[in-house]
Image (spheres, helix red, strand yellow):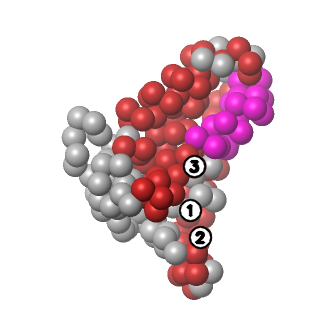
């Protein structure tokens, strides 16, 4: 998995690209939280004795498209609080949340991602896995392995996210209309 430091790259890139008028700060903060949310399955695993490879273990149901859809719909009910349309809130939150599982598919370790749960128990990886998987133990993170992981994330997550954000911003500018 990418670290919790890099999962926010996708909502931050969308926020940069679309601007505050479309993605107000409270919505951006919610998108950042949702981009990290699936990794709370680690806490559930440790508390409940759930095995890593179980559907409710790490990278299982909380990394699925269905989970992202349900959470985005539930949280999207508060769209008027952020002075945005339901459509904008829903899609922003859905992409923020689903990006977690998709980014994890590009890592080079673990048991795969349960993207299609509950329709399939199969775990998926992307055909190309350039992102170094983050160590699950904190002690390993504060080592050369952690430096390798963060360097990999800068190259394969943050740099592309920045390019996408700047591209969206550039696309927004000529008309000033946005979504």
Give me the C-alpha separation between circle 3 and circle 1. Answer: 9 Å
Q: Is residue 60 left or right of residue 131?
A: left
Marked residue nearer the N-terminal end (1 or 2):
1
Q: Of 128 and 58, which appears nearest the observer?
A: 58
Q: Nearer the viewer, mark 3 or mark 2?
A: 3
Q: Which residue is depicted at the point 63% across and 59% down?
A: 5
State which tag comes first along the sequence, 3 or 2: 3
Label 3 CA crowd tier, 10 Å (few <14, some 14–19, many 20+): some
Q: Residue furthest front?
A: 48
The image position of residue 145, as x and y in percent, is 53, 81
Q: Nearer the viewer, residue 122 or 147?
A: 122
Residue 137 to residue 48: above or below:
below
What secondary structure do most residues of the magenta stretch adopt?
helix
Tag 2, which secondary structure? helix
Q: CA distance from mark 1 to mark 2?
A: 8 Å
Q: Earlier in the sequence, mark 3 or mark 1?
A: 1
Task: Give above or below for 144 relative to 117.
Answer: below
Q: Which residue is mark 1?
A: 3
Q: Residue 23 placed where, x, y %?
A: 71, 28
Left or right of 44 on screen, residue 65: left
88 on left or right of 117? right
The C terminus - image quarter: top right
The numbered disc on residue 150 is: 2
Residue range in magenta is 12-34
Residue 119: percent from the left, percent from the top?
A: 23, 35
Cα gap from disc 3 to disc 2, whole angstroms: 16 Å
Q: Which mark is residue 36?
A: 3
Magenta run includes residue 14: yes
> Which SS class for mark 3?
helix
Q: Quadrant of residue 154?
A: bottom right
Quadrant housing residue 20: top right
Check contact, mark 1 vs mark 2: CB within 8 A.
yes
């Amino acid at each position: 998995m990418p670290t919790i430091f890099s999962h926010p790259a996708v909502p931050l890139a969308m926020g940069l690209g679309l601007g505050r008028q479309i993605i107000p700060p409270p919505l951006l903060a919610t998108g950042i939280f949702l981009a990290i949310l699936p990794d709370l399955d680690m806490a559930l695993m440790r508390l409940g004795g759930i095995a890593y490879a179980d559907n409710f273990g790490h990278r299982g149901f909380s990394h699925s498209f269905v989970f992202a859809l349900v959470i985005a719909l539930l949280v999207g009910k508060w769209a008027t609080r952020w002075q945005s349309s339901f459509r904008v809130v829903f899609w922003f939150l859905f992409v923020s949340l689903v990006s977690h599982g998709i980014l994890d598919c590009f890592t080079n370790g673990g048991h795969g991602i349960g993207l299609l749960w509950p329709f399939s128990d199969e775990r998926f990886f992307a055909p190309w896995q350039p992102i170094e998987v983050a160590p699950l133990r904190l002690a390993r993170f504060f080592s050369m392995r952690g430096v390798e992981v963060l360097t990999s994330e800068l190259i394969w997550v943050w740099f592309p996210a920045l390019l996408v954000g700047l591209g969206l911003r550039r696309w927004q500018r000529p008309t000033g209309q946005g979504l």
